[in-house]
């Protein structure tokens, strides 16, 4: 055994490729479960996507959430709203199911000032149904354009099979956070879309690093059989494992700190990012590369087990 072969053997701690069917089954189970829950419970859409009014209240001193909630009920009795959520020590926020007339918002602010003092300020964000529908459409288009552009680049820069593997991995990465938001009844708003786009970027970056190492090893290692192919991918995954872990860990702990200590306005963004970072790292290692192996094996069978490295 040559020194290079010994080095390749020593880097493999666990045969990931051999167990790929288990990883496929695990992902399918999560996605099917998430789909069923989404069909039964739906998404907790924010005001950005279903129309209504979001109201942020800066009380300016300590207060009881129950008291603010009671004041809102008295000032706007005919419009339903979500339970008031406090943030920091002197702020609160809620969302109304419908657009709140301006005069009622003025009356509500006056009632809060009468109760807590003139330092109270309110900030409202109202979205009409037409605008909400347009936002949903444009958010979907933005995700589609970003995903397609990335896939085309990978297919041209590497090879077509890598592009197909990325499509499947991206679908996995986008669906998992959406399903988890449905399960935990977290609000889906524009910051969630921003988080999804961020997740797509991180996941693709990690996947490209792994695919680039696979491409390099295709040139340097002798890959003539399916067993050689699986061994080469195993080596490639373990050679990039530490880099993948360190990259996601730095962003994960930052997002976790923001979720725990940050304001209410960006908490859902942080949670979506955390969910996506975990699913994206998992898919890059255990899904994307494994899908490529499966597709490459079929190609090799058609070409009598001949592998030609892409020189792109």
Image: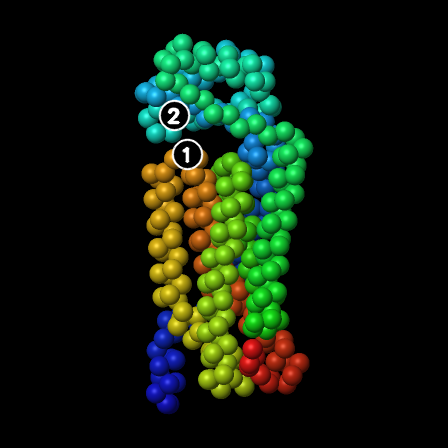
Q: Quadrant of the N terminus?
A: bottom left
Secondary structure type for disc 1: helix
Marker disc for residue 264 = 1
Q: Distance between the residues labelled 2 and 1?
A: 10 Å
Read off the residue under disc 2: 91
User: Could you say where residue 236 lies in the image, as x and y percent from the top left?
Assistant: 44, 74
Residue at 53% in and 38% down:
189
From this view, report whether residue 214 is shown above or below residue 178.
below
Q: Residues within 10 Å of mark 2 (few under 14, many from 20)?
A: many
| Image quarter hosting the C terminus | bottom right
Instruction: Identify which residue, 222 or 18, lies in the foreground.
Output: 222
Question: Is there a contact, CB below 8 Å, between mark 2 and mark 1?
Answer: yes
Q: Which residue is drawn at 64% across and 49% down?
A: 141
The answer to whether residue 140 is left or right of residue 59 is right
Residue 128 image point, x, y percent: 63, 29
The mark total stands at 2
User: What residue appears at the point 38 percent right and 25 percent down from the top-left corner?
Assistant: 91
**Where in the figure is residue 109, as x and y percent of width and height?**
46, 15
Q: Nearer the viewer, residue 44 or 12?
A: 44
Is residue 113 in sight in this rendering?
yes
Q: Can you say whether 131 is above or below 66 in the image?
A: below
Q: Which of marks 2 and 1 is nearer the N terminus?
A: 2
């Amino acid at each position: 055994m040559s020194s290079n072969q010994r080095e390749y053997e020593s880097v493999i701690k666990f045969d990931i490729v051999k167990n790929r069917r288990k990883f496929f089954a695990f992902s399918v189970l999560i996605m099917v479960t998430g789909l069923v829950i989404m069909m039964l419970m739906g998404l907790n859409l924010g005001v950005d996507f279903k129309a209504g009014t979001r109201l942020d209240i800066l009380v300016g001193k300590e207060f009881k959430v129950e008291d603010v909630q009671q004041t809102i009920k008295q000032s706007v009795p005919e419009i339903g709203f979500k339970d008031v959520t406090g943030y920091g020590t002197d702020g609160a926020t809620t969302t109304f199911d419908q657009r709140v007339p301006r005069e009622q918002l003025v009356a509500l602010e006056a009632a809060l000032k009468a109760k807590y003092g003139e330092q109270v300020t309110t900030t409202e964000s109202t979205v009409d149904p037409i605008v909400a529908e347009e936002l949903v459409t444009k958010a979907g288009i933005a995700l589609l354009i970003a995903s397609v552009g990335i896939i085309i680049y990978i297919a041209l820069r590497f090879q077509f099979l890598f592009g197909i593997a990325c499509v499947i991995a991206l679908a996995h990465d986008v669906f998992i956070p959406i399903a988890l938001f449905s399960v935990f009844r977290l609000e889906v708003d524009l910051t969630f879309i921003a988080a999804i786009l961020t997740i797509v970027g991180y996941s693709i970056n990690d996947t490209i690093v792994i695919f680039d190492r696979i491409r390099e090893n295709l040139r340097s290692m002798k890959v003539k059989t399916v067993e050689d192919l699986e061994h080469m991918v195993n080596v490639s995954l373990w050679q990039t494992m530490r880099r993948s872990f360190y990259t996601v860990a730095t962003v994960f702990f930052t997002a976790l700190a923001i979720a725990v200590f940050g304001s209410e306005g960006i908490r859902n963004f942080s949670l979506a990012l955390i969910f996506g970072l975990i699913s994206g790292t998992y898919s890059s290692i255990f899904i994307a590369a494994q899908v490529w192996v499966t597709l490459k094996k079929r190609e090799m069978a058609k070409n009598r087990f001949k592998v030609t490295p892409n020189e792109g």
